[in-house]
Amino acid sequence: LNPPPLRLGPPQQLLVMTGGVRGGGRARRRGGSDGRGRSRGPAVRPPAKLLTASLARAESASEVLRLYAEHGSAFNEIHLATCWSRLASTSQKEGRALSAGDLAPLRQQTVVLADTLGPRAIASTAHALARLGHFSGAGTSDGDEWDALWRALGVAAALRVTEEGGAAFGPQGLSLTAWAFAKASAGQAPPQALLDAIAVAAIPRLHEFKAQELANLAWAYGKS
C-alpha cells in the first residue's frame, strides 16, 4: 500500500519571481550588475503563496532542492511539507535515490520546526518521508539523524491528535500518519502512544473514512 499524498491546499498558478511581476518589469539576475554597471541588492524573495506554488509545480528533485537552497530559510510549515512531498514524488518518478547530503539541511530544519507543524503538515511530511524510504533505525550511517526526525514528528503528531482531535487531521490525515509511522518503523513496533491517540480520534469517525483510508489504518495497526 502506498497511499496518495495529502494535498495542503488547492493548486495555485505558478509565478516564478526573480524581480518584477508577470507582464511587467524585467527579469533580474542574481547578484552582479544590472547590465549597465550598477550593482543591485539581493534578489527579491517570492511571497509565501508563490513559493508554495513553485514547489508544488517543481518537476524534478533537483528543482525542489534548488528552491530549498535559495529560499529554505523563509520556509513555513506548508513550504516544508510541500517540499518533502515533491521530493518524494519527483525522486520516485525519476528513479533517483536522494543522498543524505542532499537532504541534511532540510531534515535538520524539520527537526527544529517539528513542534510548530500543524496536523496536515505533519501527516504530509511523515507520508513523504516514508515514501522516500528514510526510516529511523534503518542501519544507515545517518540513521541517528533520521531517528531524531521521526521522534520529533511522532511527539508532535501525538500531541496534535490528543489536543486537537480527529477533526483537525481528517480521515486522510489520520490514516496517512498511522501508515507512515508503521512503514517507517523498520520492523519494529510503531510508536504506541501515537497509534493509541490516532485510534481514540479515529474510532468515532470511522463512518467518514473512505476504503483506502480504512485500508491504511488496518495495515498500520496490523504492524503494531
Image (cartoon, rainbow, N blue to C red):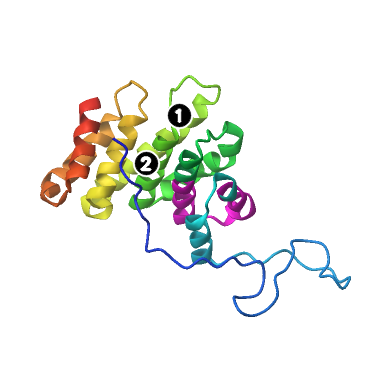
Q: Which circle's residue, 2 or 1, is located before the other in the chain?
A: 2
Q: Residues in magenta?
A: 64-86
Q: Quadrant of the N terminus?
A: top left
Q: Say whether residue 224 is visible.
A: no
Q: Residue at x 26, y 33 (%)?
A: 193
Q: Nearer the viewer, residue 138 or 163?
A: 138
Q: Is residue 46 magenta?
A: no
Q: Residue at x 59, y 53 (%)?
A: 67
Per the picture, the main secondary structure of the magenta-coloured stretch is: helix
Task: Categorize mark 2 by other alpha carbons within 10 Å: few (<14), some (14-19), many (20+).
Answer: many
- Mark 1 lies on residue: 147
Q: Quadrant of the C terminus?
A: top left
- Mark 2 lies on residue: 127
> Based on the displayed image, in which of its 4 quarters is residue 215 positioned?
top left
Task: Categorize mark 1 by other alpha carbons within 10 Å: few (<14), some (14-19), many (20+).
Answer: some
Residue 145 is situated, as x and y percent measured from the top left of the image, at: 52, 30
**What's under tag 2, amino acid-wise?**
His
Q: CA distance from mark 2 to mark 1?
A: 15 Å
Task: Tell me: 155 left or right of 198.
Answer: right
Residue 135 is situated, as x and y percent measured from the top left of the image, at: 43, 29
Q: Is residue 66 magenta?
A: yes
Residue 45 is situated, as x and y percent measured from the top left of the image, at: 62, 64
Q: Nearer the viewer, residue 1 or 103?
A: 1
Total numbered badges shown on the rendered structure: 2
Q: Nearer the viewer, residue 57 or 151?
A: 57
> Based on the displayed image, in which of its 4 quarters is residue 44 positioned?
bottom right
97 versus 212 height, above or below: above
> Based on the displayed image, in which of its 4 quarters is residue 43 positioned?
bottom right
